[in-house]
Image: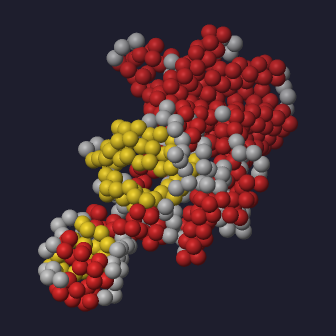
Amino acid sequence: MINYMRAEFYKAFHRKYTYGFLLVVLLCEALLVAGWAFTNANGNDVDFASGAGILCLMMGVGLYCTLLTGDMVFSDQYKFNTLKNEVSYGLPRARIYLGKLIVSCVTALVLCVIILCAYVGMCWVVLPHGTGVAETMRQIGYCILVALPVWLGAQALVLMFYFLLKSSTVAAFIFMGVIIAVPEIIKLLSALVNPIFQYVYMVLLTTPLDLAPNNFGDMGLLGLSWAVGAGWFAATTLVGLIFFRKREIS
Amino acid sequence: MAESVLVTRNLTKKYGPATVVNNVNLNIEKGQIYGLVGRNGAGKTTIIRMVTAQTVPTEGELSLFGATEPGALGKMRARTGAMVEIPSFYPYLTAKENLEYYRIQRGIPGKGCVDEVLRLVDLKKAGGKKFKTFSLGMKQRLGLALALMDRPDFLLLDEPINGLDPEGIVELRNLLLDLNRERETTILISSHILSELENLATHYGFIDNGRMLEQISAKALKEKCRACLELAVDSAPAAARALEQGLGVRDYEVLPDNIIRLYCHLDEPARVTQLLVENGVALRSIEQKGANLEDYFLSLIGGVRHD
């Protein structure tokens, strides 16, 4: 398993894609911070607390980024037919599946740390430090703690779709559907059909991220996010493993 | 008795109602170069794909180096090298990076093996080029490099000659013969270019419509395909007596239906005919026979089909 993971890291970090993605995100962050600095120069008053605090509202973006971090590792294996090189050498399919899942999670975490630290660092350097810096950092920390398990759950969901569907594009579309459309449908069902759907809404990946900005420090929400993340992670990995076990590699 | 490398028992693969491989029994022993002969769609690739775990057999058993259980089979697959259909690699990595990726993944110690196999398949200079820029022939060579990287005991090659230029074909043939001779590598090679197999194989399996028609050693096949005069007579014993006494012939065989195969005096059919007539043997027909691999295969499947 260690060799398998080392190879996946080798591949992921030998791609321009990985560095391109990171560069684009960092550029976007730099533009955002530069924009605030520009407005501050024109009389506005965006300080570190407001600038960095916006991260709490943007945790949902991390869900979509799992599509890219999953793709960095899975690398269109069905399109390039490269899985045959792995299974023909006798590598167990569970090792292939779990190896890619772990590496995509670790890659996502590494990129996440770089992206978040870079943003907070840029805000720290560029924006004025008013009051509430410590409180902002606490809020960001709390939101990250809530988001982390949900992101990992989403990463497992993405990998399941990549492994089970022949086309990565179709997998991406279905994942977007699960993240964007399903919560809205469940909301409608709970309002129009039966309030019991509210319970279903509570276990969706997006719910803890929606609730976090208005419930800083709520340990119940933190517990819910870890339970939801772990549940999605375990369930999608199990389903993925079962179906990948006998999948035709052509 | 030689060690069995690959044994299949009633190996069957069905896709819906279509049976692509039908009760195939294979036995490949250590040191053999086994040529799997069949037309396109005969089931050759599917057999190799089942052996290499790319697809799961619908029925039947498969044993690799004596292992039959899934876990043990997986371990034995690490002793194999395979090139199935068109070699596939990551297009955005160079040839060297691709091989390095698989070297790490397979836990092969020492980076030197990557350069060694690239040199072996004559891709040393192209090692720094991205896979997406490779021609089909270069892809084939890289696929072969991957198959050879862990010094396999058993090499499975599916149509490896496709895309190679004449020089490449000769190099591949020599490489495979060297591996077989020097490392005792057992090789399963599928091809529909039969003339190439004739230069390599020590054993053949003829497959058609998913069924194994015949397995035969190259020696036995050569014997079967030996050039001869085939005589159809009214009395085989009388003809045999005449041939022995008149021409001193010993190298012949008597087949059912009063048919005699004469393996000498091939350029003297008139003399043979005259001798038989003089000895009162009625000759129904006389025909010069002898087949190459292609003729033999076509005779097995009942001639050229146009379906």
The answer to whether one can see residue A242 in this image is yes
The x and y percentages for residue B50 are 44, 45
Q: Nearer the viewer, residue A123 or B203?
A: B203
Height in image: B190 above or below A247?
A: below
The x and y percentages for residue B10 are 35, 42
Q: Residue at x 78, y 26 (%)?
A: A49
Q: Is residue B142 left or right of residue A53?
A: left
The answer to whether one can see residue A236 in this image is no
Q: Is residue B256 left or right of residue A166?
A: left
Q: Residue at x 79, y 40 (%)?
A: A37
Q: Residue furthest front?
A: B245
Q: Residue at x 51, y 49 (%)?
A: B29
The quarter of the image holding the N terminus of chain A is top right
Q: Nearer the viewer, residue B258 or A18?
A: B258
Splitting the image into 4 quarters, where does residue B223 fall? bottom left
Q: Nearer the viewer, residue B117 or B248?
A: B248
- The colour scheme is secondary structure
The x and y percentages for residue A98 are 59, 32
Q: Nearer the viewer, residue B290 or A174?
A: B290
Total numbered badges shown on the rendered structure: 0
Splitting the image into 4 quarters, where does residue A86 fall? top right
The x and y percentages for residue B170 are 57, 73
Q: Residue at x 86, y 36 (%)?
A: A125
Height in image: A215 above or below B305?
A: above
Q: Is residue A189 left or right of residue A150?
A: left
Q: Residue furthest top?
A: A220
